[in-house]
Image (cartoon, rainbow, N blue to C red):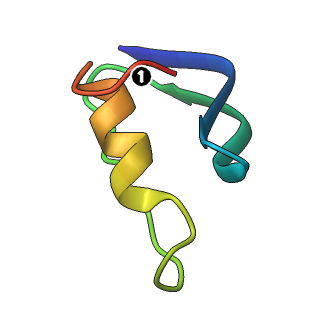
Amino acid sequence: MIRIDSATKRYGATVAVDNLSLNVQEGEVCVLIGPSGCGKTTTLRMINRLVEP
């Protein structure tokens, strides 16, 4: 299970992810879609602890 509650990530004055909450239950498939620069990669990096929220 993946649970994120109100995660925000900033790079200087730029907000990459703002107040993200997400619950993915075991066995579920989750897809992140959106335009370039909307925070998809940053979200995945936060989930994998490659960057701190």
Camera-nearest residue between 26 and 4: 4
Q: Is 7 on the left-hand or right-hand side of 6?
A: left
Camera-nearest residue between 14 and 4: 14
Q: Is residue 19 above or below residue 16?
A: above
The amino acid sitting under disc 1 is: Gln
Can you tell which quarter of the image residue 1 is in?
A: top left
Q: Is residue 11 above or below residue 1?
A: below
Q: Please report the residue visible at 53 percent of the width from the left and 85 percent of the height from the top.
A: 35
Q: Which residue is mark 1?
A: 25
- Element on which disc 1 rests: loop
Determine crowd level at label 1: few under 14, some 14-19, many 20+ residues with C-alpha closer than 10 A: few
Q: Is residue 44 above or below residue 48?
A: below
Q: Is 39 on the left-hand or right-hand side of 8?
A: left
Residue 15 pos. (x, y %): 69, 50
Residue 27 pos. (x, y %): 25, 29
Camera-nearest residue between 12 and 35: 12
Q: Is 20 on the left-hand or right-hand side of 23?
A: right
Can you tell which quarter of the image residue 52 is in?
A: top left
Q: Please report the residue visible at 32 percent of the width from the left and 26 percent of the height from the top.
A: 51
